Amino acid sequence: MDPHKFRSQHDLELYEQLLKDRDVQNVNEQIQRQVEKGNLGVRRRLLSTSVRLSPTMAPDLHKTATECQEKLSLDIPLELYVFPSPSYNAACVKPEAGRLFIMFSSSILEAFTAEEIRFVMGHELGHHLFNHHDIPIGYILRGQNRPNPRLALTLTSWSRYAEISADRAGAFCAYDLPAVAHALFKLASGLSGQYAEFSVDDFLRQVDEMQSEDNAPGQGAPTEDWFLTHPFSPLRVKALRLFFEAELMQSGNADLDQLDLGVEGLMALMEPSYLEGKTDAAEAMRRLLFAGAIAVANASSGISPGEIEVFEEFFGKASFSSKLNIEQLVKEVPERIEQVKSLSSIPQRMQVVRDLCSVSRADNHTTEAERQVLCDIATALEISSVFVDKLFDCEPELD
């Protein structure tokens, strides 16, 4: 079966959209110039900071890699590396000089079973299979010039669906749902299995509880998870159960629309959209974003052209006008906060705070006065100010 058939359609659509984005193209052009100058040296850094596992040193791992490559119809020289870390992690590094590199943390190789490693190996190879490295998400999100809010939202949404596609590649290699689910449980919990007996049904019940929360999907999850580039692990397992049950895995034929419809229903739990929503909660959140963005931008020396540009990324061209009563809008922030609190869940409020942070970073820095306004709004929304710190300090994960 052609492994490209099971790529998430949402992944593919957003991937093609992002490739046309001028900001993404600019970053890719910058990276290419660095490659041509020989300034990146990915393999050189890997050799100096990690240990290359040769076929003699890790024959079973290389055998797994070869089998996964064959199953995914990949033909590229592969180098495997291990780096010391107590965290379970792995990453596929963009090819250099015709070689592909896969990195594993020491703890994941020591704690995962052979079938669990097979899933991880297939997952990482899946990122190469589906050309996910064409979207340099790390460079864009960590770069000096922050992406506009719309691009940032599209990038994180695409990244989550890219993980779904890579998970399918890993599952196709392992062909063992219990082992795949156990691997994702270990990644989510950090447990190796010594202190907890794993149950797929209990693990998946977390998703059911997210969905059953009235207007507050996923409220019990760690707050920062709502803004990671990876889906919640229970969601990934449930999405993979749909994949294993699909005709695609049974006969090679697939109703991808039906499969992806089910997956998108799950992924919506991580994307409580309000910018285009029609609900009272969405309208209240937009009103708070409007007034809150003015309050944050005005906190230090007035509203700058960069802040106006970001503001109009959210609300459209000419949405900012000299006719706006800035003083009145700032005064209305507390009232709008109370309205949002009465209509929305904490995760939904967190997205408003995240978007307000985008406004504060419009000039590539945030003043203490702006941060204070952000913390005051977050606190009033019953969100810890620590969350604001996380938004400014967070880095995309290896994947």
Image (cartoon, rainbow, N blue to C red):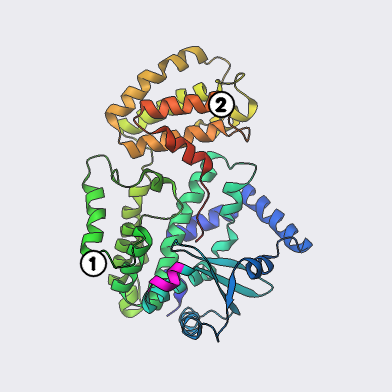
Query: Quarter-wise, where is residue 71 in the image?
Result: bottom left
How far is disc 1 from disc 2 in space, using C-alphas?
47 Å
Of residues 193 and 127, the one drawn nearer to the viewer in this rendering: 193
Which is more N-terminal, label 2 or label 1? 1
Say whether residue 108 is magenta. yes
Of residues 13 and 52, the one drawn nearer to the viewer in this rendering: 52
Segment colored magenta? 107-112
Task: Tell me where residue 114 appears, x and y as whole percent.
Answer: 39, 79
Q: Amino acid at mark 1?
A: Glu
339 relative to 360 in the view: left or right: left
Of residues 227 and 191, the one drawn nearer to the viewer in this rendering: 191
Report helix, strand or loop for mark 2: helix
Q: Residues within 10 Å of mark 1 (few under 14, many from 20)?
A: few
Query: Quarter-wise, where is residue 176 in the image?
Result: bottom left
Which residue in the rendered view is the most extreme toward the right? Answer: 37
What secondary structure is the magenta-colored segment mainly? helix
Q: Amino acid at mark 2?
A: Glu
Relative to 193, is 69 above or below? below
The residue that disc 1 covers is: 197
**Can residue 293 be seen?**
no
The residue located at (22%, 53%) in the rendering is: 208
**Can residue 328 be seen?**
yes
The residue that disc 2 covers is: 368
Mark number, residue 18: none
Task: Tell me where residue 5 appears, x and y as whole percent.
Answer: 43, 72
Relative to 166, is 314 above or below? above
The residue located at (32%, 80%) in the rendering is: 251
Image quarter hosting the N terminus: bottom left
Task: Tell me where residue 29 appears, x and y as whole percent.
Answer: 70, 55
Say whether residue 70 is magenta. no
